[in-house]
Amino acid sequence: MRVSVLIPVFNKAPYLRECLDSVYAQTFTDFEIIAVDDRSTDNSLAILKAETDPRLRIIELPQNLGPGGAANAGLDACRGEYVVRLDADDLAVPDRLQRQVEHMDAHPEIGASSGSLQLFGASGHTWSFPLTDELCKAQLLFGVPVSQGASILRRSVLEAHAIRYAPSWPRVGEDWLFWVRMAQVSRFNNLDDVLTLYRRGEQNISHGQNKVATHRVILREVFDMLGIKATAQDIDTHLMALTYFTAPADAASMRRLRAWLDHLLALNAERALFPQAAFAARVGKAWNDLYYRLPAQSMSASLEHLRLSGSWPRKRLLFLVKWKVNTLLGRTP
């Protein structure tokens, strides 16, 4: 058995039929499907039980364990050389398995890989992920380096290092923590191709979540797992690098953020937690991208960001002037 397609299921009845059909229609055919019903309260389980394809195996959990617990039950049951993850409300493009198996066969050093997500439903954008292991590792303090719903994992790596989701992890963001754990023992990369059609809408587990509160919890776990000492204020400061603001940004908060990012760069130079050049570039990107969110916070934050950057590019000054003019004219920039 080459591939186990793992699909955790919780109350996804309206989308489940279409999800399964996208797997049945794959150009690559040496696979099984492990569908884990996480004690759904709709008719998801009935839909699964009505299936007749012998490649489908169903696991019924006696109680709701959340995404991580359901994934663990599925991982324990997988028999394939590779584990392919798919969310029950998403769709796999027809040649997804073919492309990912060929890629992993050609790169035995890679333990996990994914590709881009094409959003549909409430949004039609494309989400892409870092292409190389160095860039993936440099991403770990800023977000997920690999798309869980478009991922393929080498099962031998999971089993050799007993990699699973921890029961203590939050139910939102568990994928980020899983990649932090796996990054300690494996290499990552991603294909620059759309592999999964990601349905965005109210059915997503993260819909309606307080993103600041959610990311506080996740970052606390990330820093602890990596052995990075961080106070509550440090975490709130780091949230600004992710463009989440716990309070309106001002000149003082810009100075705190710049000092925190410089601390992370120095810490990485000392401990080599991440590839240094890639991490420095990722820190620089977070700092530079933040500038365009600051006028909505305060002019003092924008001007202090420019001062701390050590340059006053005409493009950025013009952006600031346009923002101010639009605001005075009552237009939302």
Image (tube, rainbow, N blue to C red):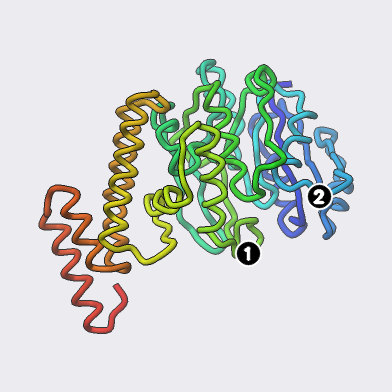
* Residue 194 locus on image (x, y percent): 50, 42
Image quarter for residue 271? top left
* Residue 83 locus on image (x, y percent): 67, 29
Q: Do the CB atoms of the residues marked 2 and 1 lie less than 8 Å apart?
A: no
Where does the C terminus fall, quadrant-wise?
A: bottom left
204, 119: nearer the viewer:
204
Q: Residue at x 36, y 36 (%)?
A: 264
Q: Is residue 29 left or right of residue 108?
A: right
Q: CA distance from mark 2 to mark 1?
A: 20 Å
* Residue 24 locus on image (x, y percent): 72, 39
Q: Residues within 10 Å of mark 2 (few under 14, many from 20)?
A: some
Residue 306's disc number: none
Residue that mark 1 sits on: 202
Query: Does residue 94 appear in this view?
Result: yes
Q: Residue at x 39, y 32 (%)?
A: 135
Image quarter for residue 156? top right
User: For the image shown, how many numbered marks are present on the structure?
Assistant: 2
Amino acid under label 1? Glu
Image quarter for residue 312? bottom left
Q: Is residue 227 left or right of residue 47?
A: left
SS for callout 2 = loop
Amino acid under label 2? Asn
Q: Residue at x 48, y 58 (%)?
A: 124
SS for callout 1 = loop
* Comparing labels 2 and 1, the label whose residue is closer to the camera: 2
Q: Is residue 197 above or below residue 326?
A: above
69, 167: nearer the viewer:
167
Q: Residue at x 16, y 54 (%)?
A: 307
Residue 64's disc number: 2
* Residue 235 locus on image (x, y percent): 45, 49
